Image (tube, rainbow, N blue to C red):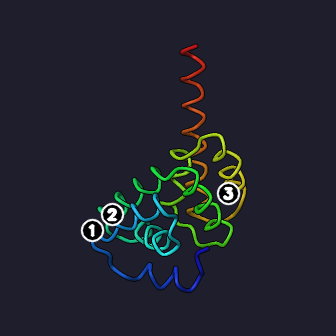
């Protein structure tokens, strides 16, 4: 869905917040590959506002975004910021993927996956105590 070279190239571009919002809407409504590429690039940028807007759009798109992030991870194109979205999108599907990443040796992605698993464990513990 997202090619490696075009994704790397778009990560170097700067996006306006408006463009990120439009991409988010296009991704949620139509599943546009170009919009997905823009959102992933915005998540990997240094601009915190664009990261936040892209993250919110990816989370709101739900399963479509989960599949996109899973593809990016498998292609070796995911950033730590993108991996952090997985538990917010789908806690059940994210755990096996995060455990796979945590078992690897990918530096920041491995650390991020472990942090996400710890968070999911704490959430599970709180839910068990409430029952």
In the image, which is nearer the foreground, mark 1 or mark 3?
1
Q: In this view, does 10 lie above or below 61?
A: below
Is residue 122 toward the left or the right of residue 95 in the image? Answer: left
Q: Which of marks 1 and 3 is nearer the N terminus?
A: 1
In percent of width and height, residue 101 lies at 67, 57
Report the Cα–Cα distance between label 1 and label 2.
5 Å
Spatial CA distance of label 1 from label 3 is 33 Å
Cα distance between the residues tagged 2 and 3: 29 Å
Seen at 33% across and 79% down, the residue is 14
In the image, 67: left or right of 119?
right
Q: Give the label on residue 95, or none.
A: none
Upstream in the sequence, badge 2 or badge 3? 2
Q: In which quarter of the image is the C terminus?
A: top right
- Residue 99 point in image, percent of width and height: 70, 49
Q: Is residue 69 above or below residue 131?
A: below
Q: Residue at x 55, y 45 (%)?
A: 87
Residue at coordinates 52% horizontally, 64% vertically from top-left? Answer: 31
Q: Which residue is drawn at 58% across and 51% down?
A: 63
Q: Which mark is residue 21?
A: 2
Task: State the residue in front, 78 or 53.
Answer: 53
Image coordinates for residue 45, horizontal then vertical, percent: 39, 71
Q: Dot 1: within a 10 Å radius of its alpha carbon, few (fewer than 14), some, or many (20 or more) residues?
A: few
Residue 124 position (above or below residue 55): above
Question: Label 3 near label 1: C-beta < 8 Å?
Answer: no
Q: Residues within 10 Å of mark 3 (few under 14, many from 20)?
A: many
Q: Residue 101 carries which label?
A: 3
How crowded is the residue under tag 2: few (<14 C-alpha within 10 Å), some, or many (20+)? some
Please tell me which residue lies in front, 62 or 42.
Answer: 62
> Is 83 in front, or is 66?
66
- Indicate which disc residue 18 carries: 1
Q: Do the residues labelled 1 and 2 touch (CB within 8 Å)?
A: yes
């Amino acid at each position: 869905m997202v090619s490696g070279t075009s994704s790397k190239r778009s990560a170097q571009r700067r996006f306006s917040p408006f463009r990120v919002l439009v991409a988010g809407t296009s991704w949620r409504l139509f599943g546009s590959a170009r919009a997905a590429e823009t959102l992933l690039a915005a998540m990997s940028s240094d601009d915190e506002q664009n990261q936040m807007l892209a993250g919110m759009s990816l989370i709101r798109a739900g399963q479509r975004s989960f599949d996109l992030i899973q593809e990016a991870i498998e292609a070796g194109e995911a950033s730590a910021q993108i991996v952090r979205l997985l538990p917010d999108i789908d806690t059940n599907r994210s755990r096996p993927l995060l455990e796979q990443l945590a078992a690897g040796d990918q530096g920041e992605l491995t650390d991020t996956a472990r942090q996400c698993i710890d968070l999911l464990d704490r959430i599970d513990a709180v839910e068990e105590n409430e029952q």
